[in-house]
Image: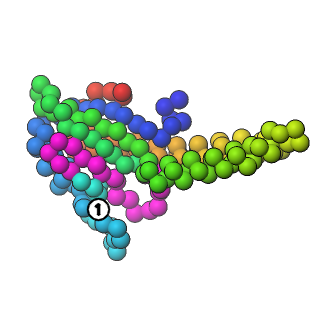
Amino acid sequence: MKWLFPFDRFEFVSVKTAAESAATLQHHTSPIRLFRLKAPDKQFAGVVSHNGFKISPVITYRNSFSPVIIGAFLPHQNGVRISVFQRPPVFTLAFMTIWLGLTWFIGGANAFADEGGLADKLFVLAMTAFAFALTSGGFWWEARHTKDELITILDGSEIGPL
């Protein structure tokens, strides 16, 4: 059921210190720009600090569900433990919530009222399934690649999902 919802939380450890991990990730991260004329040569865009980061993958195509990656560098006995949470952008989640809310408010009121037929009910259920598939598919497509890339860049090994 994890694939149904577009959120991912995981942890991994690295033999690097928190400062080394932050510097390495900063090397692979460009600043956020509102408009880009060409794609940056970095894998991520965002902000990296000594205690954490908030980044997004740099992609050369449109994917509104591409994850926002929020992480923290935590002390660990042999280096650093990196706790990561991936989610879609807030605007995308708000849009999908409004879209599904209107589908259920308008379509559901008609479909599940006394005069609603089977086609009306199936339409509302199909729109709901489509919204979940679109959101989850777009998110997990990027989240899988981003997770592997992040672990590789920071020389980490995954502890496991949370």
Residue 104 shown left or right of residue 142 in the figure: right
Residue found 33% across the figure and 33% down from its top: 10
Does the magenta stretch mainly form a helix, a strand or a loop? loop
The image quadrant of residue 35 is bottom left
Residue 63 shown left or right of residue 125 in the figure: left
- Magenta segment: 48-66
Q: Nearer the viewer, residue 28 or 121?
A: 121
Furthest toward the top, the residue is 77
Amino acid residing under circle 1: Ile
Q: Secondary structure at mark 1?
A: loop
Residue 155 visible in the shown view: no
Q: Which residue is mark 1?
A: 32
Image height of 58 relative to 87, above or below: below
Q: Position of residue 98 (x, y in %)?
A: 59, 50
Q: Is residue 51 magenta?
A: yes
Residue found 23% across the figure and 39% down from its top: 72
Q: Residues within 10 Å of mark 1 (few under 14, many from 20)?
A: few
Furthest toward the bottom, the residue is 37
Residue found 13% across the figure and 49% down from its top: 23
Q: Nearer the viewer, residue 117 or 24?
A: 117
Residue found 34% across the figure and 74% down from its top: 37
Q: Position of residue 60 (x, y in %)?
A: 40, 63
Q: Position of residue 84 (x, y in %)?
A: 30, 38
